[in-house]
């Protein structure tokens, strides 16, 4: 890559800098290839092969067929529905909360919310499941005080799980959208106001279009983490909602049968395909609106 | 893009353009104030509902841990934290893994975010794609893949000298397998956080200024870029800490017993109140730590890039 220095902006395109840049990125790429690439390829390979200890593996479509039938298929559909709906709610709620925090006069509130979001979004499902069992479980504080069970409430239902998932999805949305909200220049709003725009018109024609890429990105991120969530459901023993992650874990544990592990690999591949589809829908949309990104 | 960032930096210090319009008729000002008033009202209700939604479960959990039905109020669950068997080894393992994960994430990502900021758009695309990949493969799928690799190694490596390495990687005191998985899981968010931190800096100008003053590129990165990246780095560290402390999927399926797995195992083994107490204390402690650090991070001199 030793191009002649004919570029009009030599400071921008320095071959030496580009080479150094690639060198700096190399360890990351190598690491991902080993720690992520190898297991991912093993999963894809295992999904299409049989496993018999001592015998060579043979190619088969049986695992994938089995993973898309009966209870496994129900679990996959249940996971997709739960993730899409909870991600959608969390995008809206998270945006509102983030905007309320960003425009707040209290710097302390912003710090408290940001740090709490960081913890809740990443701490995972175990404390979360316990907290909701204590609040809204069968013997939970609110369930017994407000006699919610008489109104048909169950934490272990589809709606119950959505309520629990929002507890980590909303913070995740807050974290992912706050940088973009900070990026909305005060001047744009003032320019809109000086031209007589109402707050609604400002959001409709300036704010939301500029935020669109981050909102989309947020939705994909949220869908991905809801789809992948396992600990919450696993710790909420007795949940009756079929989820693909629970099915994979059961199959992997080896309690079902020896070749169930390869069906688990096939189910994992199904998950990857769905997550990839969501990502693929997102990328062109993001490109289209990325020119507004600051 | 650099131009936009630079103008954003300079406008911070200038009086807001609206003051230039201060001489306008009061009608438009009233409109602005009315708009502000309406937004503030909306914000109040958003904050109130959020506070209820997020605080009530925590309050109910605390209530559950101190409410000992027959006798009433009791702090037994919290007293048992110090004596219950298995908690400290599990916590130690988690903290060790967290430290290792944070170090590896820094070593891999900090050179990357600097390079991405200075490099071509193609480099950015490659890196963004690499750091998004783990989002496409859910944790449980990664775990399935890892357990498949481990099974293959177990079947095929036994006669070879690599077997010792393989066993070492699964050592229960410091499972390297978990460390690798956790770094992979931390990558997407850590990259986003660090990259967002870099976006607020005009890296090229900062580097050129430092290099004009005689600093080498490495020196410029360490002593000019990194200090400006401090809050993003702190955030990354604590989000990673929270991730590792709370991680359950990989560890439980591969059969290790770090913190979160101990909590769930103990809970189903009948140690209900203690495990709930431990989980809520760990949650609140991590939050407190992150909060205090976010306060301290600002006090030590703020840069113009941080609002």
Image: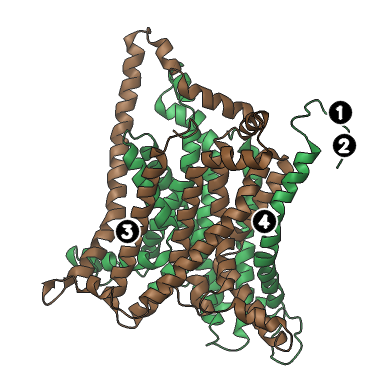
* Disc 3 crowd, CA 10 A, few/some/many (<14, 14-19, 20+): some
Q: Secondary structure at mark 2?
A: loop
Q: Which chain is green?
A: A
Q: Residue at x 38, y 8 (%)?
A: B24
Q: Are marks 2 and 1 in contact (CB under 8 Å)?
A: yes
Q: Are marks 4 and 1 in contact (CB under 8 Å)?
A: no
* Picture coordinates of residue A154, whole percent (x, y): 31, 68
Q: Secondary structure at mark 1?
A: loop
Q: Which residue is mark 2?
A: A3
Q: Chain of mark 2?
A: A
* Picture coordinates of residue B31, whole percent (x, y): 34, 19
Report the Cα–Cα distance between label 2 and label 1. 8 Å
Q: Residue at x 48, y 67 (%)?
A: B96
* Picture coordinates of residue A41, whole percent (x, y): 70, 70
Q: Is residue A122 visible?
A: yes
Q: Secondary structure at mark 3?
A: helix
Same chain? Circles 2 and 4: yes
Q: Residue furthest left?
A: B71
Q: Tell me, what colour scheme is on the image?
A: by chain
Report the Cα–Cα distance between label 1 and label 3. 59 Å
Residue B198 location, quadrant: top right
Q: Which residue is mark 3?
A: B284
Report the Cα–Cα distance between label 4 and label 3. 33 Å
Q: Earlier in the sequence, mark 2 or mark 4?
A: 2
Q: Are marks 4 and 3 in contact (CB under 8 Å)?
A: no
Same chain? Circles 2 and 1: yes
Q: Which label belongs to residue A279?
A: none
Please determine whether, in this image, residue B59 is positioned above or below residue B13: below
* Picture coordinates of residue B140, whole percent (x, y): 55, 70
């Amino acid at each position: 890559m030793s191009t002649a220095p004919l570029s009009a902006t030599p400071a921008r395109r320095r071959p030496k800098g580009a080479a150094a840049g690639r060198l700096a990125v190399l360890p990351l790429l190598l690491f991902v290839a080993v720690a992520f690439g190898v297991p991912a390829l093993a999963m894809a390979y295992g999904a299409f092969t049989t496993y018999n200890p001592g015998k060579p593996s043979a190619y088969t479509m049986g695992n994938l067929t089995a993973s898309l039938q009966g209870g496994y298929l129900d679990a996959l559909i249940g996971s997709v529905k739960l993730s899409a709906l909870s991600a959608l709610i969390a995008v809206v709620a998270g945006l509102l909360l983030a905007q309320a925090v960003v425009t707040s006069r209290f710097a302390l509130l912003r710090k408290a919310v940001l740090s709490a979001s960081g913890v809740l979004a990443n701490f995972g499902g175990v404390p979360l499941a316990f907290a909701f069992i204590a609040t809204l479980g069968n013997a939970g504080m609110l369930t017994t005080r407000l006699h919610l069970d008489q109104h048909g409430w169950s934490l272990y239902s589809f709606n119950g799980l959505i309520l629990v998932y929002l507890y980590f999805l909303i913070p995740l949305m807050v974290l992912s959208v706050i940088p973009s909200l900070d990026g909305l220049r005060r001047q744009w709003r003032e320019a809109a106001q000086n031209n007589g725009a109402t707050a609604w018109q400002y959001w409709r024609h300036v704010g939301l279009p500029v935020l669109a890429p981050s909102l989309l990105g947020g939705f994909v991120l949220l869908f991905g983490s809801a789809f992948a969530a396992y600990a919450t459901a696993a710790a909420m023993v007795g949940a009756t909602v079929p989820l693909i992650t629970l099915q994979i874990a059961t199959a992997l544990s080896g309690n079902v049968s020896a070749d169930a592990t390869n069906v688990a690999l096939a189910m994992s591949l199904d998950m990857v395909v769905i997550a990839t589809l969501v990502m693929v829908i997102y990328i062109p949309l993001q490109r289209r609106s990325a020119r507004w990104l600051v | 893009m650099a131009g936009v960032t630079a103008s954003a930096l300079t406008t911070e210090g200038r009086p807001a353009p609206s003051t230039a319009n201060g001489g306008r008729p009061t009608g438009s000002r009233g409109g602005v104030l009315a708009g502000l008033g309406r937004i503030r009202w909306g914000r109040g209700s958003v904050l109130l509902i959020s506070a209820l939604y997020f605080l009530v479960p925590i309050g109910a959990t605390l209530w559950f841990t101190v409410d000992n039905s027959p006798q009433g109020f009791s702090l037994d669950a919290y007293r048992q934290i110090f004596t219950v068997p298995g908690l400290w080894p599990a916590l130690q393992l988690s903290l060790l893994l967290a430290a290792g994960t944070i170090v590896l994430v820094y070593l891999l990502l900090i050179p990357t975010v600097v390079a991405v900021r200075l490099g071509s758009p193609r480099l950015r695309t490659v890196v963004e794609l690499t750091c998004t990949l783990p989002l496409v493969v859910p944790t449980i799928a990664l775990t399935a893949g890892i357990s498949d690799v481990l099974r293959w190694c177990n079947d095929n490596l036994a006669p070879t000298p690599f077997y010792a390495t393989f066993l070492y990687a699964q050592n229960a005191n410091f499972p390297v397998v978990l460390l690798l998985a956790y770094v992979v899981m931390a990558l997407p968010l850590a990259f986003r956080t660090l990259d967002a931190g870099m976006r607020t800096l005009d890296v090229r100008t900062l580097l050129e200024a430092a290099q004009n003053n005689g600093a080498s590129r490495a020196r410029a990165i360490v002593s000019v870029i990194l200090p400006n990246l401090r809050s993003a780095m702190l955030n990354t560290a604590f989000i990673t800490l929270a991730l590792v402390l709370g991680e359950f999927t990989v560890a439980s399926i591969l059969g290790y017993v770090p913190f979160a797995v101990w909590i769930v195992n103990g809970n189903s083994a009948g140690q209900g109140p203690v495990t709930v107490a431990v989980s809520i204390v760990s949650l609140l402690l991590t939050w407190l730590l992150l909060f205090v650090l976010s306060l301290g991070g600002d006090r030590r001199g703020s840069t113009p890039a941080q609002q």
